[in-house]
């Protein structure tokens, strides 16, 4: 009898500890959510990833055009994009809060630019949560309001807007895996125009994840789609890839 009581007591203690921990991790605002996203994969998320993608532009007349882009992401904050063929000299370089655009091998930039899809879809898992929180605040997303929704059959957190509001700056995160799903923002020059980005078809990369489909919408109409393939995680990348002065001299895939 004493042994049984002792075992019951231990079991209740464990349950109490779990309940206390769960309350401590309760997500009540956007800051807590961003911290939880970081903590869930701390030390497990890949540090780099390379892949190819089909970049599909969807035109208003129903036609479309497709390009192949090579991409190399180094967390946090560095993304190199080469448009194939590389010899044409087209691409983009996102590095340390700046963007440089390349056309025919000539650079336009760098100019200040924070790629919020990188921040919320990748960097959040590989940099201190405080840095992500500040970047999101700087973007003008209110981290105080948070509510739960079901989107495409998946329970999600929505940060930055109340229920039914699809016009305020906001981001959506899957509850189960704490993966970024959706960013909605008004156009900075035309507030009535709404831009939306969606991450989908998540696949494992080591112990982390990558969305192999990214879709862009304007006022609810699909305008652009990315489809990733040949994905490789934790690839050792040459730092010269992110030196704009060496854009034509370096390549992601040799």
Image (spheres, helix red, strand yellow):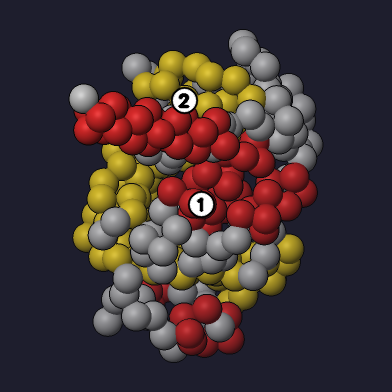
Q: Position of residue 252 (x, y in %)?
A: 35, 76
In the picture, the quarter occupied by the N terminus is top left
Which residue is tagged 2?
Answer: 156
**Residue located 50% across and 45% down the image:** 37
Towards the viewer: 49 or 253? 49
Q: Position of residue 9 (x, y in %)?
A: 35, 30
95 above or below 12? below
Q: Which element carries disc 1, helix, strand or loop?
A: helix
Q: Which element carries disc 2, helix, strand or loop?
A: strand
Marks 1 and 2, the one that precedes in the sequence: 1
Q: Is residue 119 visible?
A: yes
Towards the viewer: 148 or 58? 148
Q: Position of residue 246 (x, y in %)?
A: 52, 87
Q: Which mark is residue 38?
A: 1
Numbered circles on residues, count: 2
Towards the viewer: 8 or 241? 8
Q: Position of residue 251 (x, y in %)?
A: 37, 80
In the picture, the quarter occupied by the C terminus is bottom left
Real-space Cα distance between discs 1 and 2? 17 Å
**Residue located 26% across and 46% down the image:** 203
User: Is 183 left or right of 202, judged from the image as shown?
Assistant: right
């Amino acid at each position: 009898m004493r042994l049984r009581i002792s075992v019951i007591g231990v079991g209740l203690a464990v349950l109490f500890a779990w309940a206390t921990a769960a309350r401590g991790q309760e997500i009540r605002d956007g800051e807590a959510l961003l911290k939880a996203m970081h903590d869930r994969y701390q030390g497990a998320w890949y540090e780099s990833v390379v892949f190819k993608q089909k970049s599909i532009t969807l035109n208003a007349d129903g036609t479309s055009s497709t390009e192949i882009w090579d991409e190399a992401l180094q967390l946090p904050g560095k993304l190199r994009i080469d448009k194939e063929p590389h010899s044409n000299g087209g691409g983009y370089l996102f590095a340390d809060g700046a963007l440089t655009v390349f056309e025919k091998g000539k650079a336009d930039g760098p100019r200040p630019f924070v790629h919020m899809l990188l921040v919320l879809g990748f960097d959040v898992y590989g940099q201190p949560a405080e840095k992500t929180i500040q970047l999101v605040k700087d973007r003008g997303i209110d981290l105080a309001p948070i509510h739960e929704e079901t989107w495409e059959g998946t329970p999600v957190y929505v940060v930055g807007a109340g229920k039914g509001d699809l016009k305020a700056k906001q981001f959506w995160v899957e509850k189960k895996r704490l993966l970024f799903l959706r960013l909605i923002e008004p156009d900075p020059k035309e507030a009535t125009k709404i831009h939306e980005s969606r991450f989908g078809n998540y696949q494992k990369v080591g112990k982390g994840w990558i969305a192999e489909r990214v879709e862009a919408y304007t006022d609810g109409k699909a305008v652009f789609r990315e489809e990733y393939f040949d994905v490789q995680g934790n690839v050792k990348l040459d730092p010269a890839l992110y030196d704009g002065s060496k854009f034509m001299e370096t390549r992601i895939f040799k």
